[in-house]
Amino acid sequence: MTTRPIAEDDLNAYVDEALDAERRAEVVAYLDTHPEVAERIAAYRAERDLLRAAFAPVVEEPLPPQLSLARMIEARRRPAGTPRWAMAAAAVLLLAIGGAGGWSLRGVDAAPSGGLLALGREAAASYAVFAPDEARPVEIRAENRAQLVAWTSRRLGRPVAIPDLASSGYRLMGGRVVATEHGPAALFMYDDDKGNRLVMFARPMTNGRDMPMAPHVQDGINGYTWADDGLGYSLVGAVAPGMLHPLADEVRRQIRSEA
Amino acid sequence: MTEMVRLIEPLIPALRRYARALLRDRAAADDLVQDCLERAIGRWHQRRADSEPRAWIFAILHNLAMTRLRRAASRPRPVAVEDVGEGDLANPASQEDGLRYRDLVSALSRLPDEQRTVLLLVCVEELSYAEAARVLDVPIGTVMSRLSRARERLHKAISDNPRPESAHPHLRRVK
């Protein structure tokens, strides 16, 4: 009887238990007569088991609330007109995410003044000043988008992208450069058909680190704040967190895909 | 969408594990999984009905992770890989196991991405070669050759660099 020669792929498939019974028997017979190879294959198996064991605890951890698939689907389904029960649910979730967000920020951000907390405060303060303004909420209107991009990019010292939220029902009104304790920031304002306004706020981060998205709330103004590639972002508005979060995810997605 | 919850939700813990193994940071990994799930919801209806959900969602996560790692590599690293807290990576378990895990995870982190990913997908996530090929978007033959090189290199890294005896104080002989 002649058998096909044993190849490295057979040995790997043996480690991964991906061989049929016949081929497996041939590999076992080969290993019986080649102790050096057998030793290496035994080590591969041991290393595989060790790898599995090293990462096994992750699947035992309880899922954080932001990874609830049902909630994410629900948030997408509700572009406008949030019923009261959903607002209540969103408020509960905000508390839960706030806790998780706070945990993930622990020890990461040594200087809160340069971190997301300060950014969120600045974004909320700018919203409070400019969003209620009837006469001149923005300095440069959406018609002059190119001019707005050029101005904000020049003042922030790096290219700034203006996300498009039209598919979520929010149109760009325009924007301006605003002052913060940490230098100039870009403010872009959007509104929907009912006149609800959102502000997307961006400025360079002093520590330049990426930071995961975290919610914040100040005087009834909700926001989601994160940092990517040296720029900090905050999307703020007087809308429920459950509606704001998918919008913030969309903003982040667009900025990342342009980067 | 209830079908999506039924098929995808049980996979979320494994997605977190793969993301954590690649990024080695709990918050960044969960952020990536969230991003992955958002995209999966958006693309669920475009998915081919016969596509296997596990390979489909792992492919989304894998591509996001690779983009993320490439962007991180193009910037100076604020933290050295070796400085990452052990708790972010693995089971503290017993001291002995903890040290072995740390050696292994550290050796794993020094593999090129194409070897590290295939090793994690096949050994830890227990994907078939065909599934891994779909996730990585390469032929099965490439999966197998990468896997073979990855095993060889990981094994060499571990056996060439045995932990010094001082790391096992309980084994030291007292004279």
Image: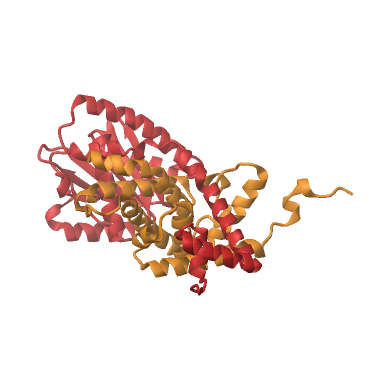
Chain colours: A red, B orange
Residue closest to the eye, A7 or B40:
A7
- Outermost residue, right side: B175
Task: Using the image, determine if residue A93 lies above or below residue B160.
Answer: above
Task: Using the image, determine if residue A181 lies above or below residue B105.
Answer: above
Residue A54 seen in the figure = yes
Residue at 37%, 57% in the rendered image: B62
> Horizontal and vertical percent for residue B111?
52, 64
Quadrant of the rendered image containing residue A137: top left
> Horizontal and vertical percent for residue B168?
73, 49
Quarter holding the C terminus of chain A? Answer: bottom left
Residue closest to the eye, A183 or A67:
A67
> Horizontal and vertical percent for residue A242?
26, 35
Q: Is residue A244 left or right of residue A171?
A: right
Task: Using the image, determine if residue A256 lies above or below residue A173.
Answer: below
Residue closest to the eye, A240 or A62:
A62
Task: Using the image, determine if residue A205 lies above or below residue A70.
Answer: below
Q: Is residue A255 left or right of residue A118?
A: left
Residue at 51%, 71% in the rendered image: A7
Residue A125 seen in the figure = no
Residue at 35%, 58% in the rendered image: B63
- Outermost residue, front side: A1
- Outermost residue, left side: A193
> Horizontal and vertical percent for residue B51?
27, 54
